[in-house]
Image (cartoon, helix red, strand yellow):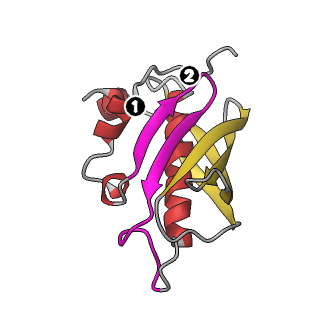
Amino acid sequence: MTPIWKQKATCDQLNRRGRNTMVDHLGIIFEEVGPDYLVASMPVDERTIQPLGLLHGGASVVLAETVGSVAGALSVDLRSHYCVGIEVNANHLRAVRSGRVTAMARPLFVGRKIQVWQIDTKDDQGKPVTASRLTLAVLDHLTPDDKWLAWLTP
């Protein structure tokens, strides 16, 4: 498989970029950068459950949007473009009460102006938990902005 990434990144770099954000608060950790996929996981604990003790659907969506949005950013030239989410949906397939859930984002379509990512989340036993789809708009920088270029720096 030919790598699709225009930005090279390690999991360590991605995890550092998540510090002091919702990603950090929920304990989301990037675990693998494959040639055409990105993997992150999240604990099922007091930060991510709803009152009945089950993984909160909103936390599942945050995980999906996080891994899909970062994958989108890695697949564009950040010197001239950036991605923003315009739609996310999730089908919650199985309840989870503990452990970790792991999400893998794979592209369904990576175009010049639109990207669509499939994000499948599984539990510790590899059983499907959530199937999500994220649509990103690929936008041009209107003015040079170093914060986008610095996105992958420590």
- Residue 5 numbered mark, or none: 2
Which residue is found at the position 67% from the left and 29% from the top? 112
Q: Compare marks 1 and 2 and give the one earlier in the sequence.
A: 2
Q: Give the range drawn in magenta.
A: 28-51
Which residue is found at the position 64% from the left and 50% from the top? 126
Q: Please, which residue is most extreme toward the front here?
A: 125
Amino acid at the residue labelled 1: Cys
Which residue is found at the position 47% from the left and 66% from the top? 98
Q: Give residue 10's position: percent from left, percent from top.
A: 40, 25
Amino acid at the residue labelled 2: Trp
Is residue 114 something that shows in the picture? no
Say few, some or many: other residues with alpha carbon within 10 Å of mark 1 (under 14 / 14 to 19 / 20 or more). Answer: some
Q: In which quarter of the image is residue 96?
A: bottom right
Q: Give residue 9's position: percent from left, percent from top.
A: 42, 24
Say few, some or many: other residues with alpha carbon within 10 Å of mark 2 (under 14 / 14 to 19 / 20 or more). Answer: some
Q: Quadrant of residue 14?
A: top left
Query: For this rendering, which residue is in front, 36 or 101?
Result: 101
Indicate the secondary structure of the residue bearing disc 2.
loop
Query: For this rendering, which residue is in front, 109 or 93?
Result: 93
